[in-house]
Amino acid sequence: MVGNGFLRTGDVVHPDMGVPTVGFYIEVEHHTWHTDVASVEYDKWRDREVRLTGGEVERVPTSHIERPKLVPYQAQPLPGAATTLPAASMSM
């Protein structure tokens, strides 16, 4: 469940993913997203604030996230089902 939490300052936390009811948040990081010092400092401050409210932030680099491999779906007959269709009747 994605959700927001609140810091002691009243600021709202907008995590990438999280479960606010238990105070657990996940932030996905990429080396090009936070290159300036100010945004890195803000993230560290926000993580400390979340911990001070009893929560936890897990930071995960994009390199640790795998995209699922798509496998073509192959329909399988149900057990005991006919494997061929009966011939169609043309009579009306």
Image (tube, rainbow, N blue to C red):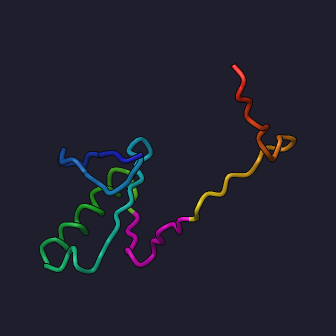
Seen at 73% across and 34% down, the residue is 88
Give the camera-side residue of 31 and 42. Answer: 31
Q: Is residue 63 left or right of residue 39?
A: right
- Tell me how many marks there are: 0
Seen at 37% across and 68% down, the residue is 59
Q: Position of residue 20 (x, y in %)?
A: 38, 45
Seen at 18% across and 80% down, the residue is 35
| Quadrant housing the C terminus | top right
Q: Position of residue 22 (x, y in %)?
A: 44, 45
Give the camera-side residue of 77 and 90. Answer: 90
Q: Is residue 85 left or right of residue 18?
A: right
Does residue 68 sit above or below 75 in this rendering?
A: below
Q: Is residue 75 left or right of residue 8?
A: right
> Which of the 4 quarters of the picture holds residue 26?
bottom left
Q: Position of residue 4 (x, y in %)?
A: 30, 46
Does residue 2 sit above or below 66 in this rendering?
A: above
Give the camera-side residue of 83 and 14. Answer: 83
| Quadrant housing the N terminus | top left
Seen at 20% across and 75% down, the residue is 34
| Residue 82 colored in magenta in the image | no
Q: Position of residue 30 (x, y in %)?
A: 30, 75
Q: Residue furthest front?
A: 91
> Which of the 4 quarters of the picture holds residue 87?
top right
Q: Residue furthest top?
A: 92
Does residue 82 sit above or below 52 in this rendering?
A: above
Range of the magenta residues? 58-70
Q: Is residue 14 left or right of residue 57?
A: left
